Amino acid sequence: MTDDFRSRAKLIPKGNRYEDFQVGRVFEHHWGRTITESETAQFSTLTLHFNPHYYNAAYARAHGHPGIVANPMLVFTTVFGLSVEDLSEGGGPFLGVNELTFYQPVYPGDTLRARSRVLDRRLSDTHKGFGIVTWHTEGLNQRDELAIDFKRTNLVRQRTA
């Protein structure tokens, strides 16, 4: 075939834009994720986070846990990642996380899901075509218990820019 496939490709925009984020809107992020024992050990090793709670079951049990504890930063990045498709996949720089709180340990075999609520939005004064949006994201386990929450802010592209 002599046709370059790129000439036939159709760009399909992904994600939400600034106009989609009305204050109070709640997103139930549809993908959940089960944390495994191997990924918490690998995550801890790759990030040089050598707390034995995250890869030594006997040590974790000696400190009151039923087994290995999932690395909290793995929990954070997992919950954050679950929100990306709805909140920031449309493009725009990440501006930060505030008020990050861990409420209880997460263990291998726990399944996390996320939901986010729009807290605030305003047009950017310095970046034309963008707005600044802040969300409150919660990570819940399979028993609907709060495991983590945080506030997150992004620049978000306007649809009408």
Image (tube, rainbow, N blue to C red):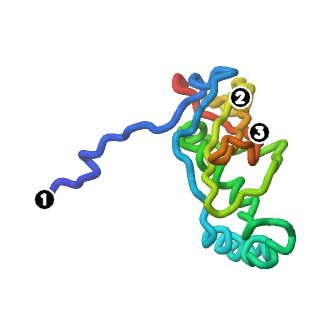
Q: Is residue 145 above or below residue 48?
A: above
Amino acid type for the residue under numbered disc 2: Ser
Rendering coords of residue 95 (x, y %) = 74, 43
The answer to which of marks 3 and 2 sits earlier in the sequence is 2
Whole-percent x and y of residue 93?
66, 44
Q: In whole angstroms, how far apart are the C-alphas of marks 1 and 2? A: 47 Å
Badge 1 amino acid: Met
Q: Nearer the viewer, residue 114 or 125?
A: 114
Q: Amino acid at mark 3?
A: Lys
Disc 2 packing (10 Å; few <14; some 14–19; many ≥20): some
- Where on the picture, by quarter, is residue 49? bottom right
- In the current view of this chain or complex, which residue is farthest to the right? 63
Looking at the rendered image, the quarter that the N terminus falls into is bottom left
Q: Nearer the viewer, mark 3 or mark 2?
A: 3
Q: Which residue is mark 2?
A: 124
User: What residue does disc 1 label?
Assistant: 1
Residue 96 appears in view: no
Res 58 seen here: yes
The CA span between labels 3 and 2 is 19 Å
What residue is shown with label 3? Answer: 151
